[in-house]
């Protein structure tokens, strides 16, 4: 049979532990290995699933549950991991729909910052971040900033060839102009 997964990995098993220590902790002796590649691959697969499930959590009204699972992903991966930026963006979007706009703006802004810092291969994450930022700012009544975020989203989504994102942006902009 398959082993039962623990609810919380040990610090040395987290992606932060890949460098030999948990984030914020003093580094242990160099002899302490990080988690096996197979464990990290499982975490990455789980993170990808959680980000994709954010749409399900949104339409089913399970916003708290989604934010909790995405929060686990955020806590599991170090700042440099693309999974962290993606989970922050998705969690921020769910927070937007809950009306928790301060958390939404913080998560989405951090996601954009991380994706921008990552550079190549994170362009779509940054583009989606601006798409989500447009919506959060619109909900917050920051219409001028929402329009600016929308224009940045449009430019980046076009550059990434993300037609679905562009359709979503048009719907969001239509609501903004009502």
Image (cartoon, rainbow, N blue to C red):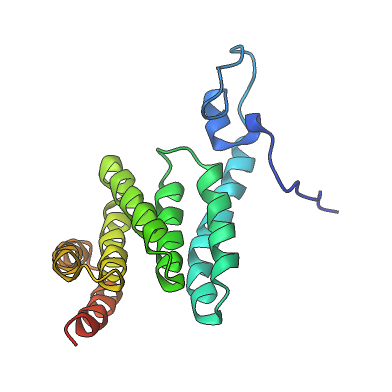
Residue 45 visible in this rendered orientation of the protein = no
Near-viewer residue (74 or 38): 74
Q: Residue at x 58, y 41 (%)?
A: 40
Q: In this rendering, would 77 be left or right of 111? A: right
In this figure, what is the number of numbered marks? 0
Q: Residue at x 44, y 65 (%)?
A: 95
Near-viewer residue (58 or 64): 64
What percent of the width, then of the height, locates residue 58?
Answer: 49, 75
Q: Residue furthest bottom?
A: 178
Is 11 drawn above or below residue 69 in the view shown? above
Q: In this rendering, would 39 be left or right of 167? A: right
What percent of the width, then of the height, locates residue 136?
Answer: 31, 67
Is 30 drawn above or below residue 38 in the view shown? above
Near-viewer residue (165 or 97): 97
Identify the image quadrant of the N terminus: bottom right
Identify the image quadrant of the C terminus: bottom left
Where residue 27 sits, quadrant-wise, is: top right
Is 128 drawn above or below residue 119 in the view shown? below
What percent of the width, then of the height, locates residue 164?
Answer: 30, 76
Q: Residue furthest right?
A: 1
Near-viewer residue (23 or 5): 23
Where residue 88 sits, quadrant-wise, is: bottom left
Q: Residue at x 53, y 57 (%)?
A: 70
Q: In this rendering, would 55 be left or right of 69? A: left
Q: Residue at x 26, y 79 (%)?
A: 172
What percent of the width, then of the height, locates residue 71?
Answer: 54, 53
């Amino acid at each position: 049979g398959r082993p039962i997964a623990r609810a919380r990995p040990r610090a040395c098993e987290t992606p932060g532990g890949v460098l030999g220590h948990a984030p914020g902790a003093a580094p242990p002796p160099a002899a302490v290995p990080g988690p096996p590649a197979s464990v990290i691959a499982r975490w990455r697969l789980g993170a990808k699933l959680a980000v994709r499930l954010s749409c399900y959590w949104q339409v089913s009204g399970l916003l708290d549950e989604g934010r909790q699972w995405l929060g686990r992903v955020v806590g599991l991966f170090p700042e440099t991991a693309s999974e962290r930026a993606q989970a922050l963006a998705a969690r921020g979007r769910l927070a937007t729909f809950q009306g928790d706009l301060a958390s939404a703006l913080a998560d989405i802004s951090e996601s954009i910052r991380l994706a921008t810092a990552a550079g190549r291969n994170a362009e779509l994450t940054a583009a989606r971040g601006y798409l989500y930022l447009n919506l959060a700012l619109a909900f917050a009544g920051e219409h001028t900033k929402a329009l600016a975020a929308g224009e940045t989203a449009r430019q980046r989504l076009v550059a990434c060839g993300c037609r679905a994102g562009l359709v979503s942006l048009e719907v969001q902009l239509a609501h903004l102009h009502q």
